Image (tube, helix red, strand yellow):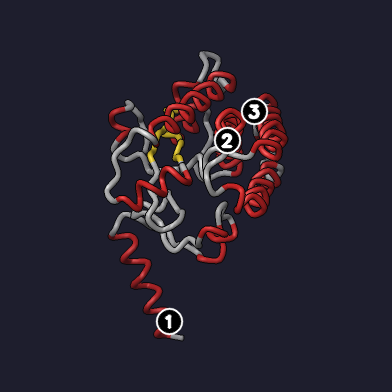
Amino acid sequence: TYKARDVMKQIVDSAWHCGDPGMQFDTTINDWHTSPNSGRINASNPCSEYMFLDDTACNLASLNLMKYRTPAGEFDVPAFRAAARISIIAQDIIVDNASYPTPRIAQNSFDFRPLGMGYANLGAVLMARGLPYDSDAGRAYAGAITAILHGEGYLTSSLLAERFGPFKYYPENRGPFLRVIRKHRAAVDNIDAALVPAEMVQACHEVWDDFLAKGDKCGYKNSQVTVLAPTGTIGFMMDCDTT
């Protein structure tokens, strides 16, 4: 028992020194894997935001959340959804026009088309709203923003699939893909609606219901659409107050 604790401490210490204070649980990660019939998830990138098949890559894009704060201090849901929609379309276009480090990574990028839209400056949004970062209210507000972003991303991906067809290996992964999507939809109900503005709660449910219906029919153009990257570098370029 002592030896196990000592080894665990070394792992955690090592993670901190690498700038990654998290631990990954293999069973949980693979339970949320959208394409398990094409292979399992063995690891993440060093910053831990991207987890998918071996020899794959993901282009990242983040939206500065403070840009969607209205003069009245509320979150501009329509503008945020529109920006997410445009970002997903742009990122999907980039997949076919990017350079990749190996032929294998390039082919998997074309075949699975994973995207990594996320956001930056969450801390500033919470502070501007007077919400403690580590609080139920802060987590609920962040959860609503994330649900809207994630839902709009997949809704856009399903609209792209309707026009251009789903990603190459979607048919063989359709069952587990939709299972994971429904797990995400169920998680939306865990957001404490009493702590979030009604417009945001309504948007969460609307976008998820819309894209579930569309996705069941048309599939999805992308195996993944969102990640939450640290934004430690691009945050400076985006004039963010927090990373």
**Residue 135 is drawn in which quadrant?**
top right
What residue do we see at 67% from left, 42% from top? 188
Residue wearing tag 2: 165
C-alpha span from label 2 to label 1: 49 Å
Q: Secondary structure at mark 2?
A: loop
Lower position in the chain sequence, tag 2 or tag 3: 2
**Which is nearer the eye, 142 or 106?**
106
Q: Mark 3 and mark 1: span between their CA atoms?
A: 45 Å
Q: Position of residue 107 (x, y in %)?
A: 39, 48
Per the rendering, the mark at residue 4 is: 1
Residue occupying image coordinates x 50% and y 64%: 25
Determine crowd level at label 3: few under 14, some 14-19, many 20+ residues with C-alpha closer than 10 A: many
Dot 2 or dot 1, earlier in sequence: 1
Quickly name the residue at label 3: 200
Check the image and report above or below for 69 versus 57. Answer: above
Say which quadrant the C terminus sits in.
Answer: top left
- Give SS at disc 1: helix
Q: Determine crowd level at label 1: few under 14, some 14-19, many 20+ residues with C-alpha closer than 10 A.
A: few
**Amino acid type at image mark 1:** Ala
State which tag comes first along the sequence, 3 or 1.
Answer: 1
